Amino acid sequence: MEDDHKDILEHLALLNAVYELKRKRIRFMQLASVDTELGNLTEHFYKIWDKTSKGFVLKDTVQHAKSIDIIKGLFGQHDEIITMMRGNKAILTVDKIRFYQYLVRHIANTRALHNLYNLFYGEENLSIEKLVKEQLPYLERYLPTFKKFDKIKNLQELVLTQFDVQNIWSIIEIYDRIRDNLIQDVTLYRLFTKDFTRLYREDLKLKILGYGEISTVMQTMHGSTLSQSFIKTKIAESDWVWKRMPPIDTLNDVEALKKVYHEYREILTKKIGIQVPEQQFRYFKTNGWYTVYAGQKKVNPQMVGNFLVKRLDERNAVTLFNKILAELKKWYSFNMSDSSLKVGIDGQISNWVLLSADGALNYVGENDTLLYIDTSTPLYRIDGIEQLNAELFLKNTPWFLRAIIRALFLQEVLDRYYDLRSIVIDCIANLYKEKRNDLIPAFIKAANYFFASIDESILPLTPDEIAKYYKSDAFIWRLFQFARRIDKFVTEVIFRKKYIYRLPEKIER
Ligand SMILES: Nc1ncnc2c1ncn2[C@@H]1O[C@H](COP(=O)(O)OP(=O)(O)O)[C@@H](O)[C@H]1O
Ligand SMILES: [Mg+2]
């Protein structure tokens, strides 16, 4: 079972209560220090007591009430002293290795981690451990006397022994020292909680949302934050998805990819008018290469085209398809109008998401709109030059296939993203994969109407053509997926090299 460090969490919860009490003591002591009554008490301490046969009693319970308040206020109620002592002992006896391990698990930055640990147990610096060690003897010594204060209902009942009176006097003598110690202790602890809760990271769990042909789409789950009083709040699901990109060797290539990733969204949304969820880009350096994630605001997976099309009847499916075609029309017109900038798009059905105006899951309404999500292969050409370094994406391909792919179909695959007819064929052919072959004739009809309406030179589609294309496309990708598995075997088992690509689960064809 996973170790959740429950003991350390309980320890921190206790400390939280203890330091609340310590802060209360400091506030009291600071008030008392400026009070003249403390001065009086220091000067006349032995004069306020009468020694009787029962023991020491107050000479004047009215006049000296304030003095007793000051004494009592030092350490508070008896049960509060007990709690403070328990907390201090816990600090001294807690399993330091487990405490350290707990910090290691939640603090990513090593220096910050050591600083945090040293606030409690540093040997070179003033530490909470050292301060607490000084507090314990007086807390223990004064405890019995303070118990007597708690027991009495009024000051007339107060009877102290010689030992108690001497005890109280010795506290008053070191009043300032006790106060300064507490202030330092509370300050260090506050530093600890502030930095620890700010830096706290719960181990993230990843949920795989989908395997695209290029990227693995993941979502982080079960992250928690810690409030300054160590209350954990679960962040149920983050609203970002992360598309893992091929590993990249140099920072220059990473920066270049980042630039085209942002730029591509700008072009789609601002120049063409296709909606794309919000995006961000993250990368981490891992042993010599960069792991790169293209982030995107999460959309409702139920409404992603390929899931949606499985549920829709023919009429609604065609309505959805016509909406996709309308988006493609915006894109097509843009590419026709601008001479220097040409944009590539992957129109397949799994790249479109329906934003339903009335939240309906099973029909496509007139006011529903589409979002385009597949921006992690950002293709656009300026004066005929591809801005994305598509070679980067070949790194996902096994080494022994790379040269073949480059020679045979890299250019062809890239070119397809710029050609309206190819894109529409690809979109319709996906219906085989989604097991909605029944929709193909209606989609072909809609596509041919569409072509006729925007450009008469585009040849109409035929069912045979779609079937043939599907077989070839499927063939290429099946080979591709299969080869990736072989590559995993070769690199892991034979070369024992760490396999750095995520292997897609078997895609059903
Ligand atoms: N923003 C998102 N929110 C929810 N699911 C997403 C999102 N982006 C992608 N997905 C899921 O992951 C799949 C693949 O993502 P996509 O960006 O199309 O990558 P690929 O280039 O590999 O096809 C999508 O079809 C969809 O099911
Ligand atoms: Mg996709």
Image (spheres, rainbow, N blue to C red):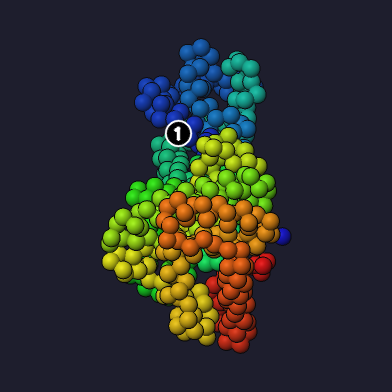
Vertical arrangement, residue 71 with respect to residue 263, above or below: above
In the figure, residue 158 lies in which quadrant? Answer: top right
**Residue 426, horizontal then vertical, whole percent:** 54, 63
- Residue occupying the point 49% across, 32% down: 25
Q: Nearer the viewer, residue 219 or 203?
A: 219
Q: Determine which quarter of the picture holds residue 98.
A: bottom right
Q: Residue at x 53, y 40 (%)?
A: 368
Q: Quadrant of the N terminus?
A: bottom right
Q: Residue at x 40, y 50 (%)?
A: 330
Q: Quadrant of the C terminus?
A: bottom right
Residue situated in front as seen by the camera: 287 or 87 = 287
Would residue 344 be visible to someone looking at this image?
A: yes
**Residue 133 placed where, x, y %?**
52, 49
Question: In this rendering, does residue 196 appear at all?
Answer: no
Residue 449, position as x, y percentages in the image: 51, 52
Image: 362 above or below 377: above
Identify the residue at the far bottom of this view.
Answer: 494
Mark 1 — residue? 26
Three-letter residue code for mark 1: Ile
Does the Cβ of the disc 1 residue fall within 8 Å of ligand 1? no
- Please tell me how crowded label 1 is: few (under 14), some (14-19), or many (20+) other residues with Cα within 10 Å: many
Nearest to the observer: residue 363 or residue 315: 315
- Which residue appears farthest toward the top when viewing the image? 62
